[in-house]
Image (tube, rainbow, N blue to C red):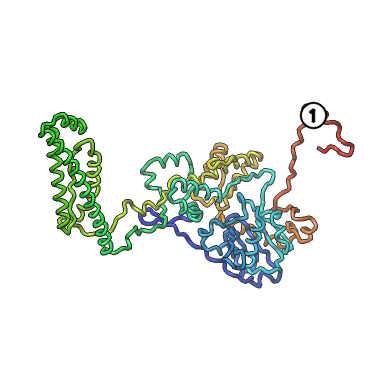
């Protein structure tokens, strides 16, 4: 994994690098004469690598083409020629086409032969390979691909394993990337679309590491100080332009003035409605007071009951307060008519709860007026402020940051604990212990002296130390072992296939000719020092039929003579 460069403030920006299209190469004459050079093809689930196994110094001893094992098919423009196909690095950026991306691999096993053929054709065409290709070396078993590779006359594979004792762990970089993507999307549901597979792979390759002791490392992350020192903040792209930020100061001022004028008109209309309502209430109270003055006591007491009042003093108090409220409202309406400036609405309640007939409407009006008070207060000439740029209520940059904490070690840990993603299988350490236990102790000691780590998954920082710790725990006390890390784990398979092809070029061992293919079919396997080994599979014996099954067969009657039983 590449070490990520620390940005200012401990914040890392996504590169979102575009893939450069694969160049169109021409095959060197050295790969044709004096004899055809083998074409080495490392068919990985992440990348496909092609190059020549040629001893001539003019031919590079490294892959000439490396591109992603991805294919995207689209219908093309309306009325166009048909389906458009993009392969490998010709995709440019995979994000716009992520819904169309297809891979020939399923759990690191090639299953889509049509897509696999598209990848091969793309590589051969860009490498300048003609139909006269004579020798091909594949880094996977020929049973998958010989039906696709009929033009070549020889096949070979560079796999080597002890078929009887080896064990496969059905995990790889694909599962790790998908696990990390699910974790981050659940953690940041607001950035679901922004957490793309490409950005997840960047986090996985440059910000993840393997913990030497997973539980101890997780306990450290509980400390706030440790978290602040080791968390990686990934900055998602965002726009700092707010709504209305493109308007000039004059336009903003004009828009605010229009809003305030509309509010002023609404306020004046509400005052007039309130004045009319209060005047009607006051007239009704004055009518009740006239009943008292005229000596009509029976009608007066009946009116007090309707008004929910107890005495004439309470009536006089309400009349006094309501008269003051009416006068204040008239005064404010008069000021609004003669003034060109916006008045400030008094925040105090203009009238108390006068009577049960109109108190509810009165208090609603007061609350409505209070809502508009801050808007009018901003436009007072005495406290007028300059219009400033609208500031966000929160930090937009921080909102678009992904805090990568324990995810840095949780994702690589699935190599050792597949149960983290629900896989019911053993991890690397348990598998190593299982394989070693299948050998005698003397051979175990020889094997642990040369534990070689290669492949893309061993590029996590801390992988070598973790393997050493696991071996120390599983091996006897004071026993020795050696763990070696490949200098270039990603290209080791290609380099191994190239060295094997150069060594066995003039031998018949391991090569499958066209005649062998036509005679024995695509499933034919020729064993050699670097091939898979045929191991017969012992099928379990069929369980004997139970007494109930026998009774049911007897009940059905004897079978016809021309039908024979098969087991």
On screen, residue 100 versus residue 541, left or right, reads left
User: Number of callouts in the render?
Assistant: 1
Across and down, in percent, residue 159 comes to 66, 53
Across and down, in percent, residue 361 comes to 25, 41
Q: Is 103 or 166 nearer to us in this picture?
A: 103
Q: Secondary structure at mark 1?
A: helix
Residue pictured at 62% horizontal, 51% vertical: 106
Q: In the rendered view, would you say 60 is above or below 468?
A: below
Residue pictured at 70% horizontal, 50% vertical: 532
Q: Quadrant of the C terminus?
A: top right
Across and down, in percent, residue 327 comes to 13, 46
Mark 1 lies on residue: 552
On screen, residue 163 versus residue 216, left or right, reads right
Q: Is 126 or 160 nearer to us in this picture?
A: 126
Q: Is 2 or 414 nearer to us in this picture?
A: 414
Residue pictured at 20% horizontal, 52% vertical: 377
Q: Kindly tell me whether residue 388 is visible in this rendering.
A: no
Residue sticking out furthest to the bottom = 29
Q: Residues within 10 Å of mark 1 (few under 14, many from 20)?
A: few
Which of the 4 image quarters holds residue 149?
bottom right
Q: Kindly tell me whether residue 151 is visible in this rendering.
A: yes
Across and down, in percent, residue 289 comes to 13, 36
């Amino acid at each position: 994994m590449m070490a990520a460069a620390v940005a200012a403030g401990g914040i890392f920006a996504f590169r979102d690098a575009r893939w450069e299209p694969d160049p169109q190469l021409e095959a060197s004459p050295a790969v044709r004469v004096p004899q055809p050079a083998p074409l080495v093809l490392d068919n990985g689930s992440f990348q496909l690598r092609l190059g020549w196994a040629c001893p001539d110094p003019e031919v590079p001893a490294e892959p000439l083409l490396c591109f992603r094992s991805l294919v995207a098919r689209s219908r093309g423009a309306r009325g166009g020629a048909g389906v458009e196909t993009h392969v490998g690095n010709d995709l440019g950026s995979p994000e716009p086409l992520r819904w169309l991306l297809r891979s020939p691999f399923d759990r690191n096993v090639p299953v889509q032969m049509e897509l696999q053929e598209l990848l091969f054709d793309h590589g051969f065409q860009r490498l300048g390979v003609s139909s006269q290709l004579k020798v091909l070396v594949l880094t996977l078993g020929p049973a998958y691909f010989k039906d696709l590779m009929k033009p070549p006359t020889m096949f070979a594979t560079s796999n080597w394993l002890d078929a009887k004792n080896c064990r496969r762990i059905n995990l790889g970089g694909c599962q790790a990337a998908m696990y990390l993507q699910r974790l981050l999307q659940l953690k940041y549901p607001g950035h679901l679309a922004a957490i793309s597979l490409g950005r997840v792979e960047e986090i996985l390759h440059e910000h993840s590491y393997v913990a030497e002791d997973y539980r101890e490392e997780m306990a450290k992350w509980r400390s706030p100080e440790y978290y602040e020192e080791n968390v990686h903040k990934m900055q998602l792209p965002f726009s700092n332009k707010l709504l209305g930020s493109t308007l000039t100061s004059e336009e903003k001022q004009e828009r605010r003035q229009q809003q305030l004028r509309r509010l002023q008109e609404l306020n004046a209309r509400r005052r007039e409605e309130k004045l009319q309502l209060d005047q009607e209430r006051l007239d009704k109270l004055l009518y009740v007071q006239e009943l008292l003055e005229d000596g009509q006591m029976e009608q007066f007491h009946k009116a007090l009951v309707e008004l929910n009042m107890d005495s004439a003093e309470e009536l006089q108090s309400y009349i006094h307060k309501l008269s003051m409220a009416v006068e204040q409202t008239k005064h404010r309406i008069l000021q609004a008519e003669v003034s060109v400036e916006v008045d400030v609405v008094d925040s105090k309640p203009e009238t108390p709860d006068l009577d049960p007939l109109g108190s509810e409407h009165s208090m609603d009006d007061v609350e409505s007026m209070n809502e508009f008070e801050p808007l009018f207060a901003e436009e007072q000439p005495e406290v007028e402020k300059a219009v400033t740029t609208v500031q966000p209520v929160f930090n937009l940059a921080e909102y678009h940051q992904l805090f990568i904490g324990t995810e840095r070690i949780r994702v690589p840990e699935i190599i050792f604990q597949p149960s983290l993603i629900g896989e019911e299988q053993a991890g690397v350490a348990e598998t190593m212990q299982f394989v070693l236990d299948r050998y005698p102790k003397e051979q175990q000691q020889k094997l642990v002296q040369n534990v070689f780590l290669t492949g893309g998954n061993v590029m996590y920082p801390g992988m070598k130390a973790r393997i050493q710790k696991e071996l120390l725990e599983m091996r006897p006390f004071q026993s020795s072992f050696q763990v070696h890390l490949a200098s270039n784990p990603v290209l080791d398979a290609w380099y191994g296939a190239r060295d094997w092809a150069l060594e066995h070029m003039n031998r018949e061992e391991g090569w499958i000719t066209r005649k062998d293919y036509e005679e024995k079919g695509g499933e034919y396997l020729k064993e050699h020092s670097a091939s898979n080994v045929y191991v017969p599979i012992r099928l379990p014996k069929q369980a004997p039929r139970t007494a109930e099954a026998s009774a049911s067969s007897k009940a059905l009657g004897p079978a016809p003579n021309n039908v024979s039983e098969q087991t």
